[in-house]
Amino acid sequence: MSVFLYTLLLTFQRHAKAEKPLCRMMGDPKYPLLSKDGEVTIGALFSVHSIESLPSFEFTQKPLLLSCSSVSLRDFRMAQTMIFAIEEINRNESLLPNVSIGYQIYDTCGSRLSSMSATMALMNGPEFTAENRCNGQSPIHAIIGETESSATVILSRTTGPFKIPVISPSATCECLSNRKEYPSFFRTIASDYHQSRALAYIVKHFGWTWVGAVNTDNDYGNNGMAIFLNTAQEEGICVEYSVKFYRTEPEKLQNVVDIIKKGTAKVIVAFLTSSEMYNLLEQLSIQNITDLQMIGVEGWITAKSLIIPNSFRVLGGSLGFAVRKIDIGGFADYVIKAFWETAFPCSQTEGNFSQYALSCNKYQDLLALKNYNEDVPEQRYSSNVYKAVYAVAHSLHSLLKCKEQAGCEKGLTIQPQQVVEALKRVNFTVKMGDRVWFDSTGSAVAQYEVVNWQQDSDGSVQFKPVGYYDASLPPHQRFVLNTENIIWAGGQLEKPRSVCSESCPPGTRKAAQKGRPVCCYDCIPCADGEISNETGHF
Ligand SMILES: *[C@@H]1O[C@H](CO)[C@@H](O)[C@H](O)[C@H]1NC(C)=O
Ligand SMILES: *[C@@H]1O[C@H](CO)[C@@H](O)[C@H](O)[C@H]1NC(C)=O
Ligand SMILES: *[C@@H]1O[C@H](CO)[C@@H](O)[C@H](O)[C@H]1NC(C)=O
Ligand SMILES: *[C@@H]1O[C@H](CO)[C@@H](O)[C@H](O)[C@H]1NC(C)=O
Ligand SMILES: *[C@@H]1O[C@H](CO)[C@@H](O)[C@H](O)[C@H]1NC(C)=O
Ligand SMILES: *[C@@H]1O[C@H](CO)[C@@H](O)[C@H](O)[C@H]1NC(C)=O
């Protein structure tokens, strides 16, 4: 990582000394996974693959290129959605008429190293030639990505000094709302500020005053959990324990599982990504811990990867907030046909395989997805990518002074900072009917579906909508739950209870337990001359 930053710094120092310095590429150039030229260009970083294998460093020759494996269908669909939206806009004669949008989509393979070099490549252009001098002008007008919060923090910090707008479709960390630190950051998803608070409201709504809390130990989980814990305290909810782990820490996970096992809370608030939830699910399943009511976040609540044999025993009845599913008209057809014919670089493999085999090597595992689109209706983040592309297009449309009849003033040079300012002003409706605009922190308005893990008659797991949370509505209409349709922990029909101490019966009163949360108390008989004829709050 630091090597790339150093390269960049060096570039600036030279820039300061000589008037027209030559830029020299220090490492191998990094090429986009999918790209197309255009008069304006949108860059993107998606984790199309999720595992990167480092070459062995023998220090006797230049290290081989990193190789990526394990396709992430979610991110691949995001890349496809981006191209779909761009092609749609390029065909549209009223939005950016006569201006073609190009794209450069890089695969980060879920790795910080790859992500950083892709960011550098996007900012500088992948190739340096003698004629290509450092003119300080990024060839990219905006970057769409990343998908995870921590990676987005790094991306926004790196591009920040150059004022290049970054629009994430799925990074929800409240930390990214800080306008001072991330002045060019936008997202077509809401900040977790709302989700964390809504988690506390859901817990309170069901009368659970005694909960356990577990989160992913990264920006997403730590920030989200901190806001939940604050709200829980305000709402009078007691937290028995708050523990965390990261996917690469099996011993910490063991510790978390032990604490959950020893705890008495029947409700667990899980601010996890799907990776950590998968690890936790495995352990709870092995240890037969199945009677917990899980309350979850958009990071895992609708993750198909969690539907494995026996997972319903552990996660059945889970309740949580999900990004709304929105059908992008025409996209499901696009991913099985037009994409492979127009946008995929190795379409020609059929018939003349050997010729393309070498250069198309990195596309082989993606080719296996040809003709498959069953997951498309379940993809919840694709519509956010679609909205992000349109937001950039609307910004450029106004900056290039486009008119439907006269076309656009193509000669204008657009500075990244202008795109940032234009993005702050966008306010339009996409064809699915949603309005797109960014609040003062650069985020979209919070609109979630509340979903419940239920089982169909054939045993398949379904994420059934049982309510919604919509922060754009007046306060008393924001949160709606259809309680009668909910299935509870382990597939039960009865709502579980989770309190530290049962209410005190008439004739007794609460006595605080030293050193324990306020929700834990003993019931002691009333003193002479006092009465309590009601159950509860005395
Ligand atoms: C073209 O874009 C405009 C502005 O977003 C939209 O109103 C219109 O419906 C689009 N036309 C087509 C054919 O998609
Ligand atoms: C898990 O729990 C179920 C029901 O309580 C029980 O029937 C089963 O034997 C347990 N399995 C293990 C491995 O402990
Ligand atoms: C495959 O490519 C080779 C080399 O370009 C060419 O000579 C050959 O005709 C091609 N075969 C087919 C079936 O297109
Ligand atoms: C777009 O460009 C084409 C070819 O350069 C020209 O014929 C057409 O009139 C232009 N349309 C607009 C709306 O500028
Ligand atoms: C966007 O437009 C809608 C409807 O025209 C309006 O209610 C909303 O306040 C606007 N938002 C911004 C940020 O201008
Ligand atoms: C308890 O006593 C108070 C005062 O006498 C009375 O107002 C109230 O209705 C009683 N509550 C019950 C549940 O009996």
Image (cartoon, helix red, strand yellow):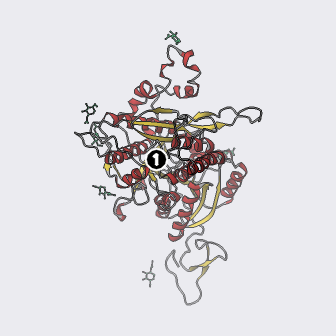
Q: Quadrant of ligand 1?
A: top left
Q: Residues within 10 Å of mark 1 (few under 14, many from 20)?
A: many
Q: Could you tell me which residue is drawn at 57 percent across and 79 percent down?
A: 508
| Residue 44 seen anywhere in this rendered image of the structure | yes
Residue 206, relative to residue 297: is it above or below? Answer: below
Give the camera-side residue of 419 and 146. 419
Give coordinates of residue 86: x percent, y percent: 38, 37
Give the camera-side residue of 196 and 68. 68
User: Disc 1 designates what residue?
Assistant: 169
**Residue type at numbered disc 1:** Pro
Q: Could you tell me which residue is drawn at 28 percent across and 43 percent down?
A: 402
Say whether residue 154 is left or right of residue 480: right
Residue 115, relative to residue 154: is it above or below? Answer: above
Give coordinates of residue 454: x percent, y percent: 49, 45
Give coordinates of residue 32: x percent, y percent: 52, 34
- Image-quadrant location for residue 307: top right
Element type at mark 1: loop
Residue ranking furthest to the left: 405
Give coordinates of residue 2: x percent, y percent: 65, 48
Q: Could you tell me which residue is drawn at 53 percent across and 63 percent down?
A: 227
Residue 291, relative to residue 31: is it above or below? Answer: below
Ligand 1 under 8 Å from disc 1 Cβ: no
Say whether residue 288 is left or right of residue 449: right
Say whether residue 266 is left or right of residue 302: right
| Residue 481 seen anywhere in this rendered image of the structure | no
